[in-house]
Amino acid sequence: MRPAPALLLVLGLAWTALRADPARPNILFLVSEDNGPELGSYGDPHARTPVLDRLAAEGVRFNRAYVTQAGCSQSRSSLLTGLYPHQNGQLGLATWGFRLYRPDIPNLPRSVRAEGYRTGIIGKLHVSPESAFPFDFAEIPAANFTRQGLRDYARHAEAFITASNQPFFLSVNFPDAHGPWLSQVDGLPARPHGPDDVRPMAYMGVDAPDVRAHVANYYSCLSRLDLLVGEVLGALERSGKAADTLVVYLGDHGADLLRGKRTSYEGGVRIPLLARWPAGARGGQVRRELVSTIDLLPTVLELAGAPPVPGLPGRSLVPLLRGAAPPWREHLFTEFHTHAARTNYWPQRTVRDDRFKLIENLLPGEVNPGYDFTLDHHRPDLRAAIAAAPPDVRAAYARMERPPRWELYDLAADPFEFRDLSGDPAHAPELARLQRVLADWRAQTADPLLDPANLARLTAEVGRAGEKSRELTWGYPYYFFGQEAPAADSTERRARKGKAR
């Protein structure tokens, strides 16, 4: 039976009001792989990123934005759940069997879908279990590090954006700038960077011709990423929905270089974060607040009119987008557990304030396996360059190889973390103060590794698993909570192994 004309009129008016509500914008996330703020808008002199630079000029640039952990799955889990990895369970890569403690943990697509949003994802999710994330639309589910069909990202985005006038959430996840660093794919970019066009990132502290050649390929990946972002933004413009869409661009963590990805140093955890919302945000802003990807879920929940999730550690960025200056956090926290398994397991907790940063290494005095892993991981030989570096740089690399329990850095005087002040009596007050802040945060967020038995058991489990962890069911989601893991499900193991990438 057809609805009465009056009912159709009422429904139509209600739908028009819903579309016109500026507090319920469309939401478009543009997520890149393995890149820090090496963009023109962040002052990088080597970057050729005009699209992202324009997005920054038109929107809001967050100058001090951070991920929770410098790993793909771990970072993305925080983006989608609003929780630190130690709170949600995604301690390492989904590829290696690491997963959320429970599939019913509240997450972004589930929350906005309940408020009438269409949900879509293009590119990899890389958080496990994938079934916990109810996307209505999904394309290019693989990581696509071979860069096949790069123009398909914008094509699929346009199809999703224009399919309905219902408000939407769409996450587009690009493969650049993940390794392998391909200088050109299908003619993109038209003018790749060469070794003479770049210098290694300052946080590396080393320079050599082969390092420059490698870094040049990284910058070429960023140029290609910029072009692909431009194609998606072009599709949004053609749809007529750009004014009513909050566009958020971010990197999932820093570049895959020594002292970058898989570390708690600034090169690993500091990211670019840009937001543009013509109908609701004040453009042209540069914000210095300490913000984290845990803030994005509360932001989206507020804009979508969804109920807040109790207990989230982050806070909404909406006041900052609108140009307000509310009281903000004084301390920002990050962490590390592992990436694959035994090759780079190194649990850490960190806190920074406006000036100082403290890193706590939970296995002090032992050799960090991530050091040799990164040196040998598809990289030019950095050992000679390290040996030729200034004394403070050589000391920083030696400290990374066998870290002490505490590392303290003055980010104002030493932004690249080469000089550890934890043993300097003149900085004892800062050390003690940040130690207290970090301990309080770990207690408030119920950090399972505060229990020495959990730390010892996780360390032993990783040591036993090694490279076979793709085939294992990890026990930590159980023994962290006083339970024992059930017998491994062979069907689940086979499915995970088949999806490994």
Image (tube, rainbow, N blue to C red):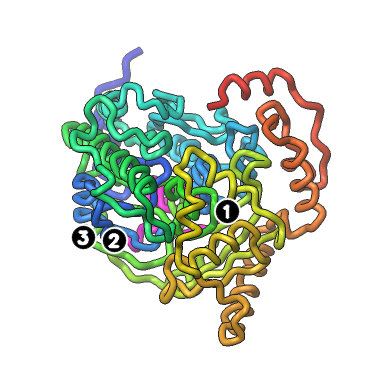
Quadrant in which the N terminus appears: top left
Q: CA distance from mark 2 to mark 1?
A: 24 Å
Magenta region: 298-322
Q: Is residue 363 above or below residue 135?
A: below
For label 1, the residue is: 310
Q: Give how far across and how far down residue 311 sits, in percent.
A: 59, 56
- Residue type, mark 1 in image: Pro
Q: Residue 94 versus residue 100: which sits nearer the camera?
A: 94
Please indicate, yes or no, whether residue 276 appears anywhere in the rendered image. Answer: no
User: Which residue is drawn at the image coordinates 26% and 34% (left, top)?
Assistant: 228
Please indicate, yes or no, whether residue 264 appears anywhere in the rendered image. Answer: yes
Name which of mark 3 and mark 1 comes first in the sequence: 3
Neighbourhood count class around disc 2 (C-alpha, 10 Å): few under 14, some 14–19, many 20 upward? some
User: Which residue is drawn at the image coordinates 58% and 38% (left, top)?
Assistant: 93
Determine if the magenta segment contains residue 33. Answer: no
Q: CA distance from mark 3 to mark 1?
A: 33 Å
Q: Give how far across and how far down residue 487 sits, in percent.
A: 81, 27
Name which of mark 2 and mark 1 comes first in the sequence: 1
Q: Is residue 128 above or below residue 265?
A: above
Label 1 secondary element: loop
- Residue type, mark 2 in image: Arg
Query: Relative to residue 320, is residue 50 drawn left or right?
Result: left
For label 2, the residue is: 322
For label 3, the residue is: 284
